[in-house]
Image (cartoon, rainbow, N blue to C red):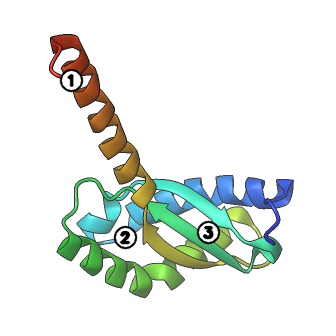
Amino acid sequence: MGRSPGLKEKRAASLLRELISEALGTLNDERLQGLTVTEVDVKRGLYDADVYLDQSIFTPEERKAILKQLKRAAPIIQSYCLEASGWFKCPKLHFHFDEQLAQQQRMEELFAKIREEDASGKRD
């Protein structure tokens, strides 16, 4: 059974979210510069971190290409985070697009549609 993140992991995640965003802005790839980090989930021991990105403006093909570029750029981003944080080590970064944001948006659209139907009396 998994344990919830401790204070150390939460602080590291918060700092990494900020530093990764800064690091992305320093890269030469415009697609990577425009990415929005939505969440960082740091694992116990600070060995690994899952980095979640906003996927809303990208097609599936673009997301695939971006993840490939991020995999190549990960060492540069990790070095930036290591230098900026002053930590002894930086977690290995694993990039993902945030599926929860898309699901939340679809749910909000469904609720809005239900409210419209209720207001117009179209529902049974």
Label 3: state its secondary structure.
Answer: helix
Residue 97 spot, x, y in % from top left? 40, 66
Residue 49 picture location, percent across and down: 63, 72
- At mark 2, the secondary structure is loop
Q: Quadrant of the image for the N terminus?
A: bottom right
Residue 78, quarter of the rendered image: bottom right
* Front position in the image: 83 or 32: 32
Q: Mark 1 points at which residue?
A: 123
Quadrant hosting residue 92: bottom right
Q: Distance between the residues labelled 1 and 2?
A: 51 Å
Q: Residue 81 carries which label?
A: 3
Amino acid at dot 1: Arg
Q: Distance between the residues labelled 1 and 3?
A: 53 Å
Observer-nearest residue: 2 or 46?
A: 2
Q: In this view, does 52 lie above or below 116?
A: below
Q: In this view, does 38 lie to the left or right of 123?
A: right
| Location of residue 50 with respect to 73 vertically, above or below | above
Q: Give the foreground label among 1 and 3.
A: 1
Q: Looking at the rendered structure, which numbered label has been put on residue 27?
A: 2
Q: How far apart are marks 3 and 2 (CA)?
A: 13 Å
Element type at mark 1:
loop
Mark 1 or mark 3: which comes first in sequence?
3
